[in-house]
């Protein structure tokens, strides 16, 4: 069965402490991998799309990378305002987009 | 910027009621989606639509129906609400063709008592 697994479930960092979030997938025929940020009580906000292995995208302190089996969201020198749940989703064709359960990131000042 | 607006942020209904959740997008997107989000389960697709008057079942359509009479509006209907339908409901829209990101509304937190 096609799956999207995110790890860890929760991550607590000190301000400035860089780390990475993982999204592993087992879908065949990947057509796109998406990262979203979700704040409490809000809908997911689109961050990046990655289409092929080796591709990288950056936005401020965030950098997303993609391999054939997984994607990483690297957070460099995070700030408290980076605290949120980060969701990964994969699109394999037709309109079948599968979401992971998310990583809840807390950045303490 | 894409704007997806859900009619209610919070809604409380009783078991057995017929419930309507409304969603409007302002970017002329062909594709629209309804998800529910529950802790530990992520987002699960209920129904989606590629065009006006068109609908497709997602992963968990039981107990729900949808209506898309206009391109910008996609409604989710709980035919006879039950307590296990208490959840956060999220609407999204996207452009057609290829792998386009979905843009989400802020959700409706629905409680069925």
Image (cartoon, coloured by chain):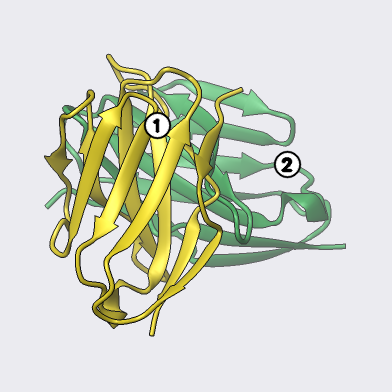
Chain colours: A green, B yellow
Q: Which mark is residue A76?
A: 2
Q: Residues within 10 Å of mark 1 (few under 14, many from 20)?
A: many
Q: Is residue A45 above or below residue A4?
A: above
Identify the residue at image location x=63%, y=26%: A58
Expressed as whole percent of the image width and height from the top left, the position of residue A77 reads: 79, 45
Expressed as whole percent of the image width and height from the top left, the position of residue B39 reads: 42, 71
Identify the residue at image location x=28%, y=73%: B17
Residue A86 as seen in the image, left or right of residue A109: left
Mark 2 and mark 1 on one chain: no
Identify the residue at image location x=73%, y=50%: A82
Q: Nearer the viewer, residue B2 or A38?
A: B2
Q: Can you name the residue that lies furthest to the top here?
A: B97
Q: How far, Cα to Cα, is label 2 from label 1?
A: 31 Å
Residue A14 as seen in the image, left or right of residue B75: right
In terms of secondary structure, where does tag 1 sit?
strand
Identify the residue at image location x=16%, y=36%: B55
Q: Chain of mark 1?
A: B
Expressed as whole percent of the image width and height from the top left, the position of residue A46 reads: 53, 34
Provide the residue designation for mark 1.
B93
Q: Chain of mark 2?
A: A
Q: Can you name the residue that lies furthest to the right here?
A: A109
């Amino acid at each position: 069965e096609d799956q999207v697994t995110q790890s860890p479930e929760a991550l607590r960092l000190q301000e400035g402490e860089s780390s990475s979030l993982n999204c592993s997938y087992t879908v065949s025929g990947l057509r796109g991998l998406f990262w979203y940020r979700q704040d409490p009580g809000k809908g997911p906000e689109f961050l990046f799309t990655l289409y092929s292995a080796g591709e990288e995208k950056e936005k401020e302190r965030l950098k997303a990378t993609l391999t054939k089996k997984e994607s990483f969201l690297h957070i460099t020198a995070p700030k408290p305002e980076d605290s949120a749940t980060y969701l990964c989703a994969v699109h394999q064709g037709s309109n079948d987009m599968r979401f992971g359960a998310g990583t809840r990131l807390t950045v303490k000042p | 910027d894409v704007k997806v607006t859900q009619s209610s942020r919070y809604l409380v209904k009783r078991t057995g009621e017929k419930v309507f959740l409304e969603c409007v997008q302002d970017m002329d997107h062909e594709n629209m989606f309804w998800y529910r989000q529950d802790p530990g389960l992520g987002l699960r697709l209920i129904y989606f639509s590629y065009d006006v008057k068109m609908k497709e079942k997602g992963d968990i359509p039981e107990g729900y129906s949808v209506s898309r009479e206009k391109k910008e509006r996609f409604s989710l209907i709980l035919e006879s609400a039950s307590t296990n339908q208490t959840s956060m409901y999220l609407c999204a829209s996207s452009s057609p063709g290829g792998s386009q990101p979905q843009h989400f509304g802020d959700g409706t937190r629905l409680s069925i008592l």
